[in-house]
Amino acid sequence: MNAIKTFIKGFFIGIANIVPGLSGGTLAVIFGIYEKLINSIWNFLKTFSKKDFLFLFNIFIGAIIGIFIFAKVLGFLLEQYETQVSLIFFGLVLGSVPFLIKQISNKKVSLQNFFLLVFAILIVLFLNIGLNTETVENQNTINIDFLYGIKLLISGMIAASAMIIPGFSGSMLLIIIGEYYNIIHIVENFILEGILIIGVGAILGILTIVRLIKYLFENHKDITYTFIVGLILGSLYSIFPNEAIEQPTIINLLMFILGIITAYLFSKL
């Protein structure tokens, strides 16, 4: 039963990783498995324990299936119901903030924590609006030569590193470097060569960033969670659809509430 729950969480984390503006790390925090995920990756690298392997296997298999299935569904949903889908995600992320704040043992507001929170918010805002994220969808035919293979490898490393940090959208960074639509095309059409290169890059990216996060949780847990709250608050700007303000409807409000309720239920689980 626990394996099924873990698989389902991995499935939704995979979906989050291909939605621009949303972070798989954010959902891992909402699901209450973020620290366990980091520790399991670290412990598995050191001891190759069966328990950590099974947990990671269920998470990653769920995430991979979520990515492959939702790569086809995402285009349709965002094309037909972009505002409603965005509002569900917005409510989900916003609703997770109280749960995150509870993880901070020292609730006393200090000047250091305040500036750290603001700094984290500004980092995400800069990535989302300070850089030019506009790009056009690339051609349907993708030629993966040596140089482009290197770029795909680096893209996989960058995206995976961002995906494991709550509040950082790996998909958004792929848009910034102009590879989001190419990678969606590679996954959607199951171009095996490209998938393998991106996969290797993703593994290298995760192995690199997990060491830093492991250290921060062990030595500066409260500061780390304060920074994570700032990252998530900053990511709200890119998720919220402007159309919801321009054309407010009951359906939009219900979708927003649905997202908050979902976050609350996940935190209770």
Image (cartoon, rainbow, N blue to C red):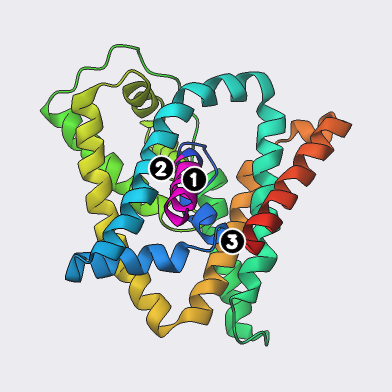
Look at the numbered discs 2 and 1 and tell me whether their residues touch, using CB distance below 8 Å: yes
State the SS at label 3. Answer: helix
Label 1 packing within 10 angstroms: few (<14), some (14-19), many (20+):
some
* Of residues 140 and 203, the one drawn nearer to the viewer in this rendering: 203
Residue 223 place in picture, x, y as percent: 51, 79
Residue at mark 3: 121
- Sequence order check, earlier mark of 3 and 2: 2
Q: Is residue 8 magenta?
A: yes
Q: Residues within 10 Å of mark 3 (few under 14, many from 20)?
A: many
Q: Is residue 216 above or below residue 63?
A: below
Q: Which residue is mark 2?
A: 62
Query: Alpha carbon of mark 3 to alpha carbon of mark 2: how far?
Result: 30 Å
Q: Is residue 217 above or below residue 40?
A: below
The magenta segment: 1-14
| Secondary structure state at the residue bearing disc 1 | helix
In the rendered image, the vertical position of residue 152 relative to residue 220, given as above or below: above
Report whether residue 70 is seen: yes
**Tag 2: Cα neighbours inside 10 Å, few (<14), some, or many (≥20)?**
many
Quarter assignment of residue 101 = bottom right
Q: Is residue 97 magenta?
A: no
Which amino acid, mark 3?
Answer: Ile
